[in-house]
Image (cartoon, grey):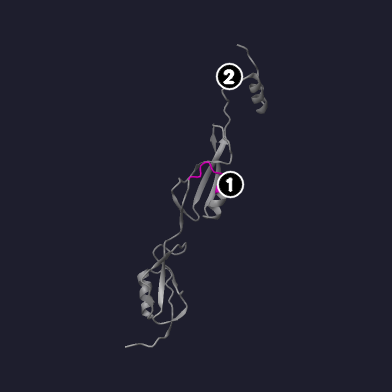
């Protein structure tokens, strides 16, 4: 027997299991789309219902097909290898685009450094998946001066070095 269409309000399925949501929709004489869609959500646990389309609270006719969207959990991003890149630029991208908490720390190195802002190491390795709110530390070089081996240097080169670093040089002939 055909039943006359009547108006029903779509129930709120947020946070429920897909099967519980399907049951609630069927109880209201609503159809459920066979393909369950997925979406990222920071507030709804993975595999639970995030929303329906049309959304809950809307009034529709019985027999309307409702699409269920289930959560994939928080969106994750895979970290790249940031070594050699500018720490300030990487920090800005990670904070704005991925909403990570980024710290830049200096790490002592004895080798000469071309760019003091270049990343020499990262606390989380490339390829690791992170999500919004995760913390990462980017390390830049803190050059610790070691005395160079001056063998083969001319007196002018030694004088220039001593002047640059405000050192007093004393020459002993051998």
Q: Is residue 158 above or below residue 15?
A: above
Q: Quadrant of the C terminus?
A: top right
Q: Where is mark 1, residue-wise? A: 88
Q: Is residue 27 above or below residue 131?
A: below
**Which span is picked out in magenta?**
81-90
Q: Nearer the viewer, mark 1 or mark 2?
A: 2
How far across and down, in percent of the image, does residue 99 sit?
53, 55
Q: Along the horizontal axis of the image, is 26 left or right of 91?
A: left
Kindly state the secondary structure of the residue where label 1 is placed. Answer: helix
Label whose residue precedes the other's in the sequence (1 or 2)? 1
Q: Quadrant of the N terminus?
A: bottom left
Q: Along the horizontal axis of the image, is 58 left or right of 169?
A: left
Q: Is residue 16 above or below residue 163?
A: below
Q: Give the residue furthest to the top.
A: 174
| Residue drawn at (57%, 28%) of the image | 146
Q: Where residue 152 is drawn, which disc sits there?
A: 2
Residue 48, quarter of the rendered image = bottom left
């Amino acid at each position: 027997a055909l039943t006359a269409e009547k108006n029903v309000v779509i129930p709120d399925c947020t946070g429920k299991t897909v099967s519980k949501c399907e049951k609630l929709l069927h109880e209201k004489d609503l159809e459920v789309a066979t393909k369950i869609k997925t979406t990222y959500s920071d507030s709804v646990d993975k595999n639970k219902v995030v929303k329906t389309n049309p959304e809950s609270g809307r009034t529709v006719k019985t027999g309307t097909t409702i699409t269920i969207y289930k959560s994939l959990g928080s969106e994750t991003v895979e970290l790249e290898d940031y070594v050699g890149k500018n720490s300030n630029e990487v920090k800005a991208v990670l904070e704005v685009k991925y909403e990570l908490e980024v710290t830049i720390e200096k790490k002592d190195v004895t080798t000469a450094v071309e760019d003091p802002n270049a990343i020499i190491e990262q606390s989380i390795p490339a390829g690791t998946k992170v999500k919004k709110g995760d913390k990462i530390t980017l390390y830049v070089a803190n050059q610790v001066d070691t005395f160079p081996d001056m063998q083969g240097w001319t007196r002018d080169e030694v004088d220039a070095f001593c002047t640059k670093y405000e050192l007093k040089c004393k020459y002993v002939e051998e």
